[in-house]
Amino acid sequence: MLFIADIVGQPGRRAVKELVPRLRQQHGLHVVVANGENAAGGSGITPRTAEEIFAAGVDIITCGDHLWDQKEVAGLLENERRFVRPLNYPAGAPGQGSTLFHTPGLPPLAVLNLQGRTFMPPLENPFHVALAEVERLRRTTKLIFLDFHAEATSEKVALARMLAGSVSAIVGTHTHVQTADEQILPGGTAFLCDGGFTGPHESVIGREIEPIVRRFMTNLPQKFEVAKGRVLLQGAVIDIDDETGRARAIQRVSEPL
């Protein structure tokens, strides 16, 4: 499988459209999962941008703390089984926190999305929610992928250590800075603390540089436009044994457009 980290704006969507077909062939991919929480103008996601991402070859889209930035997201939450939002919203919130992707001839892949709480908007405790949901999903499949959308590296590592051996892979998102700690944890769980982001890297985590610098220097409001230069598709390719659900390998991806 390929996981594509946070798609940022039109440059990120263009990278997915142009690079995913080649990456599918190059790595013999069965499934592509992408975090799309910044896909619409750099903040949030809409049915139109989601459909563009699906048409480019992405099978499942995950989200994060920018879930509600576009009012049109309601259509995705209500109608799209290929779209998941963080599971640890309170009961009764629209949408789903996990879904199953079916590939002919293979067991289904469960895709689970959680959001951290450290330096993040308060949601239910992801550790408790993760344990209950993984136990439920394992009654159906051993193939479980988790996008943990969180700020603190300690929170991501701790969740991965807690779930080691019970899920196939965990990749962190949200910071937009790719880490170099890819590994297979005891029990066969692939882990990468942060997959980075897919979009313009001649930037400050995807946005034009000068307004961000001015904001830090003056504390005055600025308009943070999506940048344009040096577009990369980032994330990870993960090889999972379809019988045991254990990861065999994880490889970081940072592919220039």
Image (spheres, rainbow, N blue to C red):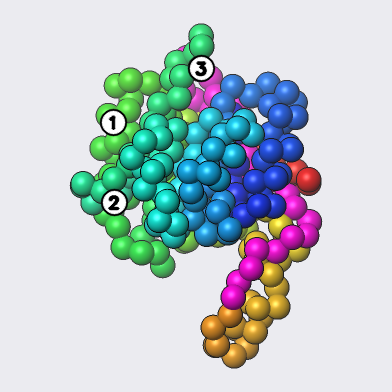
**Is 234 inside the magenta-drawn segment?**
yes
3D distance between C-alphas at marks 2 and 1 = 18 Å
**In the rendered structure, which segment of residues is drawn in magenta?**
223-250
Of labels 2 and 1, the one closer to you:
2
3D distance between C-alphas at marks 3 and 2 = 29 Å
Residue at position x 70%, y 64% from top? 227
Can you tell which quarter of the image residue 4 is in? top right
Mark 3 and mark 2 lie on one chain; the one further toward the N terminus is 2
Indicate left or right for 18 with 179 as reference. Answer: right
- The foreground one among 52 and 221 is 52
The numbered dot on residue 103 is 3
As drawn, which residue projects farthest toward the top? 105
Residue 14, position in %: x, y? 70, 45
3D distance between C-alphas at marks 1 and 3 = 22 Å
**Given the image, on which type of amino acid does mark 3 rest?**
Thr
Mark 1 and mark 3 lie on one chain; the one further toward the N terminus is 3
The numbered dot on residue 89 is 2
SS category of the residue bearing label 1: helix
Q: Residues within 10 Å of mark 2 (few under 14, many from 20)?
A: many
Can you tell which quarter of the image residue 70 is in? bottom left
Residue wearing tag 1 = 135
Residue 171, position in %: x, y? 52, 43
Residue at position x 75%, y 26% from top? 26
Residue 21, position in %: x, y? 71, 29
Q: Is residue 228 above or below residue 105?
A: below
Mark 2 and mark 1 lie on one chain; the one further toward the N terminus is 2
SS category of the residue bearing label 2: loop
Residue at position x 40%, y 35% from top? 80
Residue 198, position in %: x, y? 65, 50
**Given the image, on which type of amino acid does mark 1 rest?**
Glu
Whether residue 199 appears in this view of the structure is yes
SS category of the residue bearing label 3: loop
